[in-house]
Amino acid sequence: MTTRKGALQLLSERIIACERCARLIQHCRRVAREKRRMYSGEEYWGRPVPGFGDPHAELLILGLAPAAHGANRTGRMFTGDRSGEFLYRALHEAGFASQADSMHRHDGLRLINCYITASLRCAPPGNKPLPAELRNCRPFLEEEVRLLGRVRAVLALGRIAFDTYLGMVSKVQGMPRKASFRFAHGASYELPGGLPRLFASYRPSQQNTQTGRLTRDMLTKELTDVRLYLGSCGKTP
């Protein structure tokens, strides 16, 4: 019988092998060939990036997509770039990560009761995915959520991740129209049908963090609110 961890590993292998979106695959491979000067001596990952974390997680963090010289270089979500530094420090402070640094996929980082994935598994040109590309990736997210099985809270980083999750669960009986849910940092929504509670945060992009739109205190508070919510739910069987 395949374990949850084993099933997620098999899904990860399928994600890595995916070549459905030619524009994205070409971009990831081109970035991996050309590289950024400061990483010229490194071998880039240059492929779709699977999710990462605790297979028994109650918190699912959903981002936009791998960064061209971050996860597309290192092969792990939010790893090797400023956005990842910002996110993992906050996760560590809130008790969801074993360490504050995330430099490469073999650095010993463990996520605690948390799993990180993305709406899109390939780095998109200009960090702007096409609607068809997001649709192509959705089945991977659906299967990921099903395999995780214990998720009680979803933290969407940014509007696209927020809309992606709502679009995925919109067929649940009794689900209000997506327009009923407004994206805003700090917002949270109880969803019908036993679905996980949905929390929203600005993305930890450099544009947001360097302008002060998203501060570390803001993100840490959001994660602390999620942790308190999970604590109020009791233990998952």
Image (cartoon, rainbow, N blue to C red):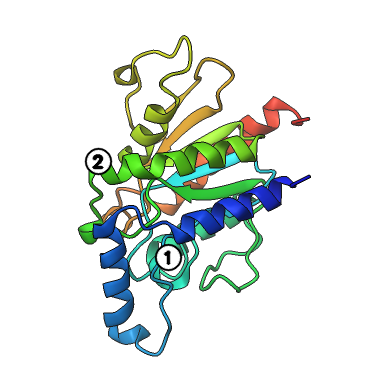
What is the number of the mark on residue 71? Answer: 1
Instruction: Report whether residue 35 is seen.
Output: no
Q: Nearer the viewer, mark 1 or mark 2?
A: 2
Q: Determine the secondary structure under disc 2.
A: helix
Q: Say above or below: 32 vs 160.
A: below
Q: Say above or below: 54 vs 45.
A: above
**Residue identifier under label 2:** 131
Number of dots carrying numbers: 2
Counting from the top left corner in percent of width and height, residue 168 is at 42, 30
Quadrant of the rendering where the N terminus is positioned: top right
Q: Determine the secondary structure under disc 1.
A: helix
Amino acid residing under circle 1: Ala
Q: As rendered, which of 212 and 5 lies closer to the eye?
A: 5
Q: As rendered, which of 139 and 113 lies closer to the eye?
A: 139
Q: As rendered, which of 158 and 146 lies closer to the eye?
A: 146
Amino acid residing under circle 2: Pro
Counting from the top left corner in percent of width and height, residue 66 is at 38, 59
**Residue at 65% across, 70% down:** 108
